[in-house]
Image (cartoon, coloured by chain):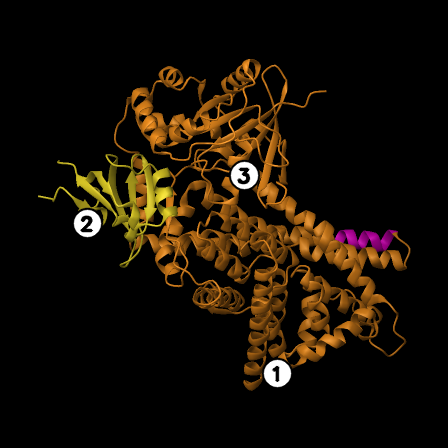
């Protein structure tokens, strides 16, 4: 059987390519990786109007075929038919923004010089109409010599016509030998693009008013930065206040599952493993899904609306003070959700030294995996009282933890740019896309992909680590009068580590929790949960929740030292693995691990001894 | 009356102009390539839209129909001719 034809979706960034991909393929998408590089491969199935299947692959957006990043290199290599792990595309759908024809046509012409069958999707035609722009599609099609279809991807308009045009070029496609190189001097393409654009544009009034109007506020020297601060404040506030109810539901479901298991299964090893290891261990991590999703909703909205680049613009002056640029703001903001997409987003930074610096400091942004740890410790040790109307002490402590991470990152960037990653600045040069209302569908698809990744992590790595830890802490069984958490295998390993960690105020249980937290920070919570649950099993306190147990056993100084440790410690194997892939070697991940552990040790120690000096020990 | 040949940084805000010349060698090769990809070329319509707060911040300008953020040293390499009216 012949495989379905492969069609590549290509276009400039901000042409609405991903929206068109979502509209054409719906939920039938696969996310994978190109071999050897960390560029994600998004593909999906699309049925032509007569039902024939086509495989559609969404290539990274690029302005030309002269790549300046690994993503852009993948696009070039796929369209040239020389990307390993990818078939040679049978045809291309080129997406262009109808309101910026001059510029997008240049890339269309460059792609056309490759001699592959292609159809032009003239996207966002509604915006062009609203701006009073009139484009003669027939004239454009005649000038270019390829079919041209007007589309509005976010409203799913023009899709039937696009599929019909695609069927047409696939049916008549002459199998010419593909060009294996491409003209990279784009100036003659640019001039030709302007000529064609002028010939096909019937009416061209002045620029779109909406974006200009919004920018007068968003980029205002005074109002702009204030607006950015307000947006960030609302975002972090929402992460906590909106998540309360769904967190309650998840906790309810987890409790019900555990009770049901206890009631229906006979007591013994399997029941303990299931309840203490699997349900409570994994549950204590899944409970943070609502907060992670809320944070991602904001980040996806800021990106899809076009505001993210404005934020980068506003931040550029500050970031250039420590040798970075506004571009680094976007990956760093994503790192508040998770350092992994953050580090992957650094690919949009052209300058290699600046990109490296951003990768090295990204783990200092307080990612959502730290929230479980912070939430448990703060809940147990910081009284829930109001400092000022509307501002609670617990929230304030959390803010201080976030700020400590940011200040640490600023200082680290400052030092790194003068030592390990020294070099001239890469500058700041970005397209500012038009503002647009994000489509709910695109946000939902993005959110689903994030939730899936998180749940897969909870179901695999976190489950395995939790179960392994439960086994290591449960066996061998301690004789009467000896604490299980000290007698067990894990307890003995922790006793070794405790020698190093005792000077910074860590007790035995914390040393034990820090080891599995290397796999993922949030495991520290389920580790403490497991350790105390196992010790408490005989004391009829099994039902007591973790926060209550901790409050009785740790001093405030110890708890604060634990928080300070987690601000800095690079405890996430996935982040280290991504840093290794993105920097092509172990050198920079080792630098990252080294400096972050050193900072964590110093910060936790300083916090502990300061607190003890104030009588909190 | 404005001089017929200014640096982009000297252009009054929202005054339309065309690009008179670009000193490509005053910027890095990657900046030059990106700007060409953004359609910067002699004769193209250009307009300064916004300056960021404080001195030394980036500028937002319109090149053709595209809005672009760039730093002052790059803008200083672009010479523009203001359009009358």
Percent coordinates x, y for residue A467 in the rendering: 79, 58
Q: Residue at x 37, y 34 (%)?
A: A186
Instruction: Answer few, some or many: residues within 10 Å of disc 2's Cα (few below 14, many 20 plus, some between 14 and 19).
Output: few
The answer to which of marks 3 and 1 sits earlier in the sequence is 3
The disc placed on residue B10 is 2
Percent coordinates x, y for residue A340 in the rendering: 58, 52
In the rendered image of this protein, which colour is used for chain A? orange
Q: CA distance from mark 2 to mark 1?
A: 61 Å
Residue placed most toward the observer, A249 or A287: A287
Left or right, A434 with reference to A300: left
Start-end of magenta stretch: A256-264
Q: Residue at x 55, y 22 (%)?
A: A177
In this rendering, do the residues under marks 3 and 2 share a single chain?
no
Residue B33 location, quadrant: top left
Residue A262 is covered by the magenta coloring: yes
Q: CA distance from mark 3 to mark 2?
A: 40 Å
Q: Residue at x 63, y 40 (%)?
A: A32
Main SS of residues in magenta: helix
Mark 3 or 1: in front is 3
In this rendering, do the residues under marks 2 and 1 share a single chain?
no
List the residue tagged with mark 3: A74
Q: Residue at x 53, y 63 (%)?
A: A364
Percent coordinates x, y for residue A525 in the rendering: 68, 63
Q: Chain of mark 3?
A: A
List the residue tagged with mark 1: A617
Determine if residue A226 is in view.
Answer: no
């Amino acid at each position: 059987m012949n495989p379905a034809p492969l069609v590549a979706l290509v276009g400039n960034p901000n042409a609405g390519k991903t929206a068109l991909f979502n509209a054409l393929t719906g939920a039938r998408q696969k996310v994978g990786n190109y071999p050897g590089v960390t560029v994600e491969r998004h593909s999906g199935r699309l049925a032509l109007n007569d039902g024939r299947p086509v495989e559609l692959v969404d290539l990274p957006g690029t302005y030309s075929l002269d790549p300046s990043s690994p993503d852009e290199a993948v696009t070039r290599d796929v369209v040239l038919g020389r990307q390993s792990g990818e078939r040679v595309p049978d045809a291309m759908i080129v997406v262009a923004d109808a309101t910026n024809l001059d510029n997008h046509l240049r890339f269309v012409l460059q792609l056309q010089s490759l001699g592959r069958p292609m159809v032009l999707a003239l996207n966002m035609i509604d915006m062009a109409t609203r701006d009073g722009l009139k484009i003669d599609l027939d004239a454009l099609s005649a000038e270019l010599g390829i079919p041209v279809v007007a589309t509005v991807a976010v409203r799913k308009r023009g899709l039937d016509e696009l599929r019909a045009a695609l069927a047409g070029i696939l049916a008549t496609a002459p199998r010419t030998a593909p060009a294996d190189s491409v003209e990279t001097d784009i100036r003659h393409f640019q001039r030709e693009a302007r000529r064609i654009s002028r010939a096909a544009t019937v009416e061209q009034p002045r620029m779109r008013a909406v974006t200009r109007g919004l920018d007068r506020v968003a980029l205002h020297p005074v109002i702009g930065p204030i607006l950015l601060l307000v947006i960030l404040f609302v975002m972090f506030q929402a992460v906590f206040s909106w998540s309360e109810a769904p967190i309650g539901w998840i906790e309810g479901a987890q409790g019900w599952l555990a009770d049901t298991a206890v009631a229906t299964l006979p007591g013994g090893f399997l029941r303990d493993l299931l309840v203490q290891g699997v349900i409570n261990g994994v549950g204590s991590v899944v409970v943070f899904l609502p907060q992670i999703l809320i944070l991602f909703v904001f980040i996806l909205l800021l990106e899809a609306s076009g505001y993210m680049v404005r934020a980068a613009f506003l931040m550029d002056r500050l970031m250039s003070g420590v040798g970075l640029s506004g571009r680094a703001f976007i990956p760093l903001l994503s790192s508040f959700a998770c350092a992994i997409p953050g580090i992957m987003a650094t690919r949009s930074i052209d300058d290699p030294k600046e990109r490296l610096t951003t990768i090295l400091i990204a783990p200092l942004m307080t990612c959502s995996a730290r929230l479980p740890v912070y939430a448990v410790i703060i809940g147990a040790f910081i009284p829930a009282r109001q400092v000022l109307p509307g501002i609670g002490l617990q929230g304030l402590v959390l803010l201080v933890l976030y700020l400590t991470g940011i200040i640490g990152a600023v200082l680290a960037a400052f030092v790194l740019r003068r030592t390990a990653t020294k070099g001239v600045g890469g500058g700041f040069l970005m397209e500012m896309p038009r503002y647009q209302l994000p489509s709910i569908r695109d946000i939902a698809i993005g959110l689903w992909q994030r939730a899936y990744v998180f749940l897969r992590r909870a179901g695999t790595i976190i489950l395995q680590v939790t179960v392994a830890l439960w086994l290591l802490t449960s066996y061998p069984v301690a004789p009467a009068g000896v604490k299980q958490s000290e007698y067990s295998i894990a307890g003995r390993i922790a006793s070794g580590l405790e020698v190093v960690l005792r000077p910074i105020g860590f007790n035995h249980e914390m040393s034990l929790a820090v080891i599995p937290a290397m796999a993922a920070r949030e495991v520290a919570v389920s580790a403490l949960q497991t350790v105390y649950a196992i010790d408490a099993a005989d004391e009829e306190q099994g039902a007591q929740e973790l926060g209550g147990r901790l409050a009785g056993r740790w001093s405030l100084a110890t708890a604060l030292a634990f928080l300070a440790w987690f601000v800095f410690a690079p405890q996430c194997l996935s982040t280290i693995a991504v840093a290794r892939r993105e920097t092509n070697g172990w050198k920079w991940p080792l630098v990252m691990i080294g400096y972050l552990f050193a900072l964590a040790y110093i910060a936790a120690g300083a916090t502990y001894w300061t607190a003890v000096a104030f009588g909190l020990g | 009356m404005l001089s017929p040949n200014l640096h982009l940084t000297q252009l009054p805000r929202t005054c339309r102009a065309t690009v008179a010349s670009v000193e490509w060698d005053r910027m890095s090769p990657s900046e030059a390539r990106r700007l060409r990809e953004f359609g910067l070329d002699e004769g193209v319509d250009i307009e300064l839209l916004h300056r960021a707060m404080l001195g030394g911040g980036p500028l937002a300008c319109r090149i053709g129909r595209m809005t672009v953020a760039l730093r002052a040293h790059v803008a200083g390499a672009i010479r523009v001719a203001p359009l009358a009216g």
